[in-house]
Image (cartoon, rainbow, N blue to C red):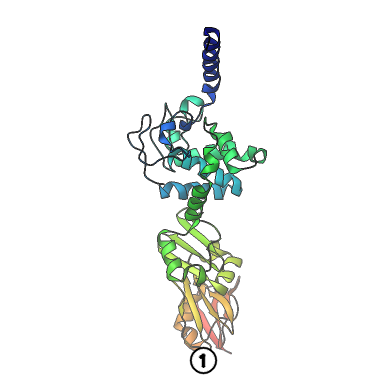
Amino acid sequence: MNLHRARSLCLSTVLSTALLAPFATSASAADGGAYAPNGVRVAGVSKAACARYPSGRDINVTRKMYEIGQKRNVSSKVMLAMFEAGWVESWLNNLNCGDADSLGIFQMRPSMGWGTRAQLQDVTYQVNKFLDVAVPIQSRYGTAGQLAQAVERSGYPYRYDQAQATAQKYINEAFQPYGTIGWLWGKLGSANGTLGGPLAAETDYQPGARYVPFSNGTVVRYSVGTAAIWGDNYKYWSSNGAATKFGFPFMLPKAAQKSPTGTTGFTQGFNRGWIYWSYKTGSHAVMPVMQGPFVRFGAEGRVGFPVGETITTSTGSTQTFEKAVITVNSAGVASMQAR
């Protein structure tokens, strides 16, 4: 090779490096030694600024990633792109190290404007930052891997599509019920049991309460414990005010007493009221204003199952049961009239 040719190639290399450097926002642009020849990151391989690399995903990270994506109602392409990027960049771990100043799940760099070092150690911030970039541009790219590359701007763009199968596996895993909700779902027969399959991953119902919706009910975890509601009682609860009116269940359904008419069914306690169900009467609630009198007059074993709702007016409250009508006047005095 002549000297002029060598100098030209050297200059070309320097210019290319200088032009590409500002766009190398992720660690994968510079840490090729952390990958196997097929482009997939290798567990345990040392990389710049990291003593050792994690041996697998952090499931707390993947669950939070999925939950945030779910809350934002992202497309399957965006969800897959996020998991592919996370797998390639960190094996889905919230790293406090990386090439140059790269950090976190996606190896974002403070020096490239992704956020402060503290922000790039916060999982919620990182995930939302990734989605803020990915969601508006998703239609421009044919595959999730191409979308991941558009966000990461890696020097090794092919690696994200190569991670598709692994990323999808961890998406599926993150979707599954876990903890006490997962335990109760399993106890009730999992997907083929009472509740059916999950419709979404665990998320906040309201402050202090978490839940998973299923095809035939829901399971809620809150300060009192974890309980499920399903079937006709779930339909009644959800269509008549749900937690706003009744609160959450604090127990599973149990067999009710047989009524004087021979009716059998189930009852379930909630923070504000009890819901009774039978094939004959359907689902109806005995609300707090009626609970004391209902029990004093013999409950379902004497007055029967409720056949209507509590009706409250300025003069008091009334509810009809199979064998009686109970009234509580405005002074709180209860009376019963046989039917």
Give the residue number, with chain letter if any, for mark 1.
260
Examine the image and state in which quarter residue 134 appears. Answer: top right
**Where does the C terminus fall, quadrant-wise?**
bottom right
List the single residue furthest toward the front: 1
Residue at the top extreme of this rendering: 4
Depicted 140 relative to depicted 21: above or below? below
The front one of 84 and 282 is: 84
Residue sitting at 61 percent across and 40 percent down?
135
Q: Residue 319 at x, y = what percent?
A: 57, 79
Amino acid type, mark 1:
Pro
Query: Is residue 114 shown to the viewer in this render?
Result: yes
Q: Position of residue 38 (x, y in %)?
A: 48, 40
Image location of residue 127, percent across then percent down: 51, 41
Tag count: 1
Q: Is residue 20 above or below residue 164?
A: above
Q: Residue at x 36, y 37 (%)?
A: 45
Q: Which residue is pictured at 39% across the width and 46% down the height?
A: 56
